[in-house]
Amino acid sequence: MKILYIHQYFKTPDEGGANRSYFMVQALKAQGHEVEMLTAHNEKGRISKSVDGVKVHYLPVLYENHFGFFRRIRAFLLFIVLCKSFIVKRNNFDKIIATSTPLTVGFIALWANKRFQIPYVFEVRDLWPEAPIQMGAIKNPLLKSWLKQQELKFYKNAERVIALSPGMRNHIEKRAPEVKVELIPNVADCEFFERVEKKDEDLVLQYGVKNKFVVSYFGAVGPVNDLMSLIKCAELSADLPIRFLIMGEGASLGGIKEYVAKNQLKNIFFIPYGTKQEVRNVMNVTDACYVSFLHKPILRTNSPNKFFDAIASGKLIITNIQGWIRGLVEKRHIGFFADSDFPAEFGEKIKPFIESTELLQKYQRASRSTAEQFFSRKELSHHFVQAIEGKNYQHEAEIRSIFSLSA
């Protein structure tokens, strides 16, 4: 098939960030499909180039993580306009894959389906508009109602919908029970990341963590990520031999750095947001990874990329997220739940892992095993290809079984 893959935030491993679309494109290409990626960049003009054998079209849409709500909306709308202009000139595709966020990418797929009869698969990475509604970013009742109507149209007109977590799948199936929904979570790249038995001494010196238990946070630092919950844990753990490493970017990073400096928190260090290789370097010296979101019901459905990088690396998982991630972490014995409302409990929960290398390694081995058994990039990419081809996945019961642990 000739496929147009639309993802406003497409990133390659060299660029850092979420690489799911990159891996799925490569899997489609390996099966003989001709795929073109339609995305955005912060340059002034449109650029088309080959990226690892795939033609990628970059549209000029300025976007930064620190943008406020209205600047984000403007970027989303501009992307819609430019994508439509592209498809008017190039509409000889057999299928479109539209991946959110933002939800507005659904407007492009639905429009192309109605105007040019191109079927589409809609991939849901976050539940919009429910997430910004619960966060208070969208308050107007009429706008809420209209956005929910559009969301339902995107689901109902899709050939198939792909959900990244059981909570997302349940939400979609409840709203549109007649729609075929595939559960394909984010992938653990077990080929790139590895569980190390011994930390690299050069990296230990580089990051200044010799004889320290290292807790790391990777990824976005925005209001929904609730990174202050980790800062509070660090503040109350100053007497423990822990170093907290933060590699991220986003609108809340400046305020967090100011808080750390003002309160002279000497156990927290910030690392510039980096490539996948740089993430792997920090993972090498890391003992535990922290995964967090605000306590909003809708955020419990999220499928954060760095959780999967962390289990692929065989790390102890510390999370403040209720829902499927907490259930998986606790029932697979790969980490523990750290309640943001009671940060003082963090120190007591992490002490056994600091004091017992054997216990830490037991949990780390279980973490890597979970990644290999249930979230392998190779296996889930195969599932994705089958979904795009309209086939039934042969091992879907296995995918559902691991999520049943978190019920």
Image: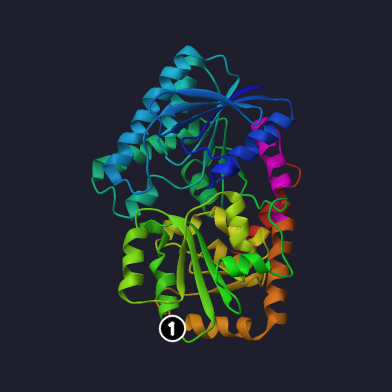
Q: Could you tell me which quadrant the N terminus lies in?
A: top right
Foreground of the two, 147 or 382:
382
User: What's the magenta region?
Assistant: 374-392
Q: Position of residue 37 (x, y in %)?
A: 55, 28
Q: Position of residue 174 (x, y in %)?
A: 49, 47
Assign a secondary structure to mark 1: loop
Residue at horizontal 46 percent and vertical 68 percent from the top: 269
Residue at horizontal 54 percent and vertical 47 percent from the top: 16
Residue 315 seen by the camera: no
Quarter occupied by residue 55: top right
Image check: 383 left or right of 121? right
Give the residue at mark 1: 344
Residue at horizontal 73 percent and vertical 31 percent from the top: 30
Name the amino acid, label 1.
Answer: Ala
Foreground of the two, 17 or 185:
17
Residue 325 seen by the camera: yes
Quarter occupied by residue 263: bottom left
Q: Could you tell me which quadrant the C terminus lies in?
A: bottom right
Q: Residues within 10 Å of mark 1 (few under 14, many from 20)?
A: some
Q: Is residue 219 above or below residue 148?
A: below
Image check: 292 left or right of 330? left
Foreground of the two, 121 or 30:
30
Asked if residue 344 is among those painted magenta in the image, a careful observer would answer: no
Q: Position of residue 306 (x, y in %)?
A: 56, 56
Asked if residue 384 is among those painted magenta in the image, a careful observer would answer: yes
Quarter occupied by residue 341: bottom left
Residue at horizontal 57 percent and vertical 85 percent from the top: 351
Give the overall secondary structure of the magenta segment: helix
